[in-house]
Image (cartoon, helix red, strand yellow):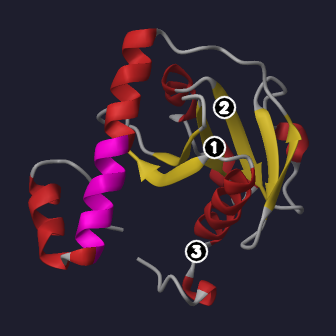
Amino acid sequence: MPNPTDITTYQPGQLLARGVSRHMRSHDFTCVEELVPARGLRVDVMALGPKGEVWVIECKSSRADFMSDSKWQGYLDWCDRYFFAVDAEFPVEILPEDAGLILADGYGAEIVRMPDEDKLPPARRKKIHMIFARTAAARLQSYRDPGVAGMFKENGMFKEK
């Protein structure tokens, strides 16, 4: 995991996620990065809104990063709105037009294109809210008590970066 106080240690995708998460706070959303909604899936940023909205933001640091990703469509079943977050140099014309678009850097972001809403079914919404809450709580507890992170990892709760 990069040093949270030194962004020069972040990978390009982590910088995008940092800027996106900061921007989401201005919309009253809270975020969890690298959240696992189901086995085999790991979303870059999941944002939970003040009315229970669930947005997934996939951070793409390059054309090659986007072209090599075959899992992103599996994330659509886990959110009300789906976005790609990219930097200003990214060739946005290769992104699907029905997905949202966020331009970001390590300090902030801007929503450029808002995707249509596709509301989650109530049972799926409850499940993802529980996953979000438990993941966030486990990570918070691991900051206070670093030894507990291994217990959560053993139980499949989350993986350390």
Q: Left or right of 47: which side holds 158?
A: left
Q: Please tell me whether mark 2 sits on a helix, a strand or a loop.
A: strand
Residue 137 x %, y %: 30, 54
- Residue at 58%, 67% (x, y): give it: 14
69 or 28, which is in the foreground?
Answer: 28
Question: Between marks 2 and 1, how big is the CA–CA gap?
Answer: 6 Å
Q: Secondary structure at mark 1?
A: strand
N-term-proximal mark, 3 vs 2: 3
Please check the rendered image and state whether residue 142 is part of the magenta-colored stretch, yes or no.
yes
On the picture, is 61 further left or further right than 45? right
- In the rendering, which numbered label is found on residue 57? 1
For the point 52% across and 30% down, the residue is 75
Disc on res. 82: 2
**Amino acid on which the number 3 mark rests in the picture:** Gln
Which region is colored magenta?
133-143
Kindly indicate whether the residue at mark 1 contacts the one at mark 2 (C-beta within 8 angstroms): yes
